[in-house]
Amino acid sequence: MTFLKTSVAKKVAMAISGLFLVLFILLHLAINLTLIYPGKEAFDAAVEFMATNPFIQIMQPILALGFIFHIGMGIYLEWNNRSKRPVKYVNNNPGAASSLASRNMIWTGLFVFLFLIIHLLNYFVPFKTQDVPDHYALVTGLFKSPVYTLLYVMAFIALGMHLSHGFQSAFQSLGTPRQKCHKFLVCCGNVFAFLVAFGFSAIAIYFYFN
C-alpha cells in the first residue's frame, strides 16, 4: 500500500493509462481512415459495429475513466513537480536538458482535452441523443467549417507533440532499460506521433477541400 502512494507508482499508473489511450487512438484513426477509403459504406458499417457490439459498449465507460484518470494524474504530477521547485534560476536554459514536447506536456494535453469536449458535443452527443440517419454526412460535414477544421488540425498536432514524448516516457516509467532502449523508443514515439498527427489532420483537410 505504501508503494501505491509513491511518485513511482503514480508514474506507472500514468504510463499504463497513456498506453491504454494509445490503443484507442489507433482504433479511432483506423476507423476514420475508412472515411476516405473504402468510403461511406465502410465507415457506416464500422460505426454500426461500434454502436452495437457489447464489448465496445462495456469499454466506453472504461475509456472515459481512462481519459479522466490520465488527465487528472497528469495535472497532479505537474503541480507536484512545480511545487517542489518553486525557485526559478535566472540562468535557466530548459532546452539544453529537455525537448519542447517534454516541457509542454501539460499544455498540449490540456489543449487536446478542450478540443475533445468540443468534439464530443459535435459528434458523440448527437450520436447518443438523436436519431442520426447518416453518420458519414455528420462527420464529413463538420470539416466544412474552417474554424472546426483548424481546431481539429491544431489539436492533433498538439496530440502528436504530446505522444512524441509520452510514448517513450511511458515505457521508461514501466522499467524499460534507458541505455539500451532509449533511442529506439524515441524513434518509435516520433514516428507514431507523426503518423497520428498527419493521419487525422489529412482526413480533416481532405474533406474541407472536397
Image (spheres, rainbow, N blue to C red):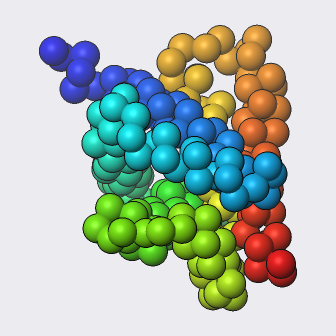
Q: Quadrant of the C terminus?
A: bottom right
Quadrant in the picture for residue 132: bottom left
Left or right of residue 59: residue 139: right
In the current view of this chain or complex, which residue is farthest to the left?
1
Q: Is residue 21 left or right of residue 130?
A: right
Does 134 sit above or below residue 84? below
The residue sitting at 52% across, 50% down in the picture is 47
Depth check: 150 or 128 in front? 128
Q: Position of residue 176 (x, y in %)?
A: 61, 14
Where residue 86 sits: x, y (%)?
38, 58
* Residue displayed at 37% across by 29% down: 55
Image: 90 above or below 17: below
Residue 33 rendering spot, x and y as whole percentages: 73, 51
In front of the other: 160 or 6: 160
Residue 3 lies in quadrant:
top left
Give x and y (percent) for residue 164: 70, 44
Q: Is residue 90 left or right of residue 183?
A: left
